[in-house]
Image (cartoon, coloured by chain):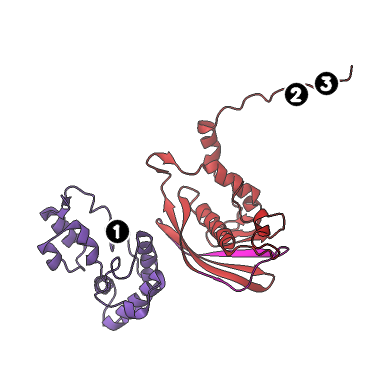
Chain colours: A red, B purple
Amino acid sequence: MRWIWIDRFIEFESGRRAKAIKNVTLAEDHLHDHFYGYPVMPNSLITEGLAQTGGILVGEHGNFEEKVILAKISRARFEFAARPGDTLVYTAEIQDIRKDGAVVSATSHVGDRLQAQAELMFAHLDQGIGGKTLFEPKNFVFTMKLLGVFDVGRQSDGSPVTQPPGLRKWRAENDEPRSEPARRRVHRGA
Amino acid sequence: MHTKDEIFEKVQTALVDALGVDEDEVTPDSTLTGDLGAESIDFLDIVFRLEKAFDIKIPRGELFPESILTDAQYVKDGKFTEAGLSELRQRMPFANLDEFAKNPVAQEFGNLFTVDMICNYIGQKVAVA
């Protein structure tokens, strides 16, 4: 199970602002328990989606040298429930960013209507706590590719956001060597 | 230019926003961790808000000194050494250390961080009317 609560980035201004969408669908298992007969997207998962939008924005700004985690939800307010068929547009804006962490203000809209707003605080962790690497950079970047960050991402000078150059080097140093794919036997009729 | 009252009001607002406490809970003598329930992540939030409110920069460790409690030179057997106290005086000229110095138990260190102490710190960084 992948814990990705946004579907695609539609805007990405490095270091400033990002917009991502989340489609709420009946194919999401938990909606059938939340609530039975009246599916409503849980506010906690909307908050998580806002945090992922903001967290990737903050992380990319630091070139993924710092690991970004959600540390504090200072404020979160929900105006109405999000239902299946809704497309939530999450907008995250960096209010403040420094070596220790960042403050992001975020909103969720359904069309023109403001559905939720939150103020989130992220903390930066070192690469390894006690020598252990918490997140592998390749997972982070893989997710960014999936979400289209490299398709829409722009630096402040208009140039595109590109994959961090260190990724290939990291893979060369750390990935297991790929084995040959097993040959498949095709049985032909006698 | 800020008056002392203005400084207190802005600090009060920052703490109310960061810690979710009521305005009347934030008095000059309130301790951050004891009375107002601040945790370590709140310190970062407080620093952000103070920087914004007063348009100043608060370098890491300047307001809330880090790693002083774990330095064996400064804290031994749960008490601050002479070297520790002099280090505190140097790093935190805005704090009132005289009472603390009489019985410098490391566990009580948190009680130094009062609202008044923050106001003094701000007062040293901005022009006071």
Q: CA distance from mark 1 to mark 3?
A: 70 Å
The count of marks equals 3
Give me the chain letter of mark 2. A
Q: Quadrant of the C terminus of chain B?
A: bottom left
What is the x, y in percent for residue B19? 38, 69
> Identity of the amino acid at label 2?
Arg
Question: Residue B57 falls in which quadrant of the image?
Answer: bottom left
Relative to B22, does residue B79 appear above or below in the rendering? above
Residue A187 numbered mark, or none: 3
Q: CA distance from mark 2 to mark 1?
A: 61 Å
Q: Identify which residue, A35 or A165, lies in the foreground.
A: A35
| Label 2 Cα neighbours within 10 Å, binned few <14 / some 14-19 / many ≥20 | few
* Quadrant that contains the N terminus of chain B: bottom left
Left or right, A135 with reference to B22: right
Q: Which residue is located at x 30 percent, y 68 percent?
A: B32
SS at badge 3:
loop
Question: For mark 1, what is the residue?
Answer: B61
The percent position of residue A27, horizontal first and vertical second, equals 72, 54
Numbered badge on residue A7:
none
Q: Which residues are magenta?
A: A76-99
**Within-10-Å neighbours for mark 1: few <14, some 14–19, many 20+:** few
Marks 1,3: beta carbons within 8 A: no
Q: Looking at numbered disc 3 in the image, what kind of residue is underneath it?
A: His
Q: Amino acid at mark 1?
A: Gly
Q: CA distance from mark 2 to mark 3?
A: 9 Å
The residue labelled by disc 2 is: A184
* Residue under the point 43% across and 53% down: A124
Q: Is residue A175 visible?
A: yes
Quick check: B30 left or right of A145? left
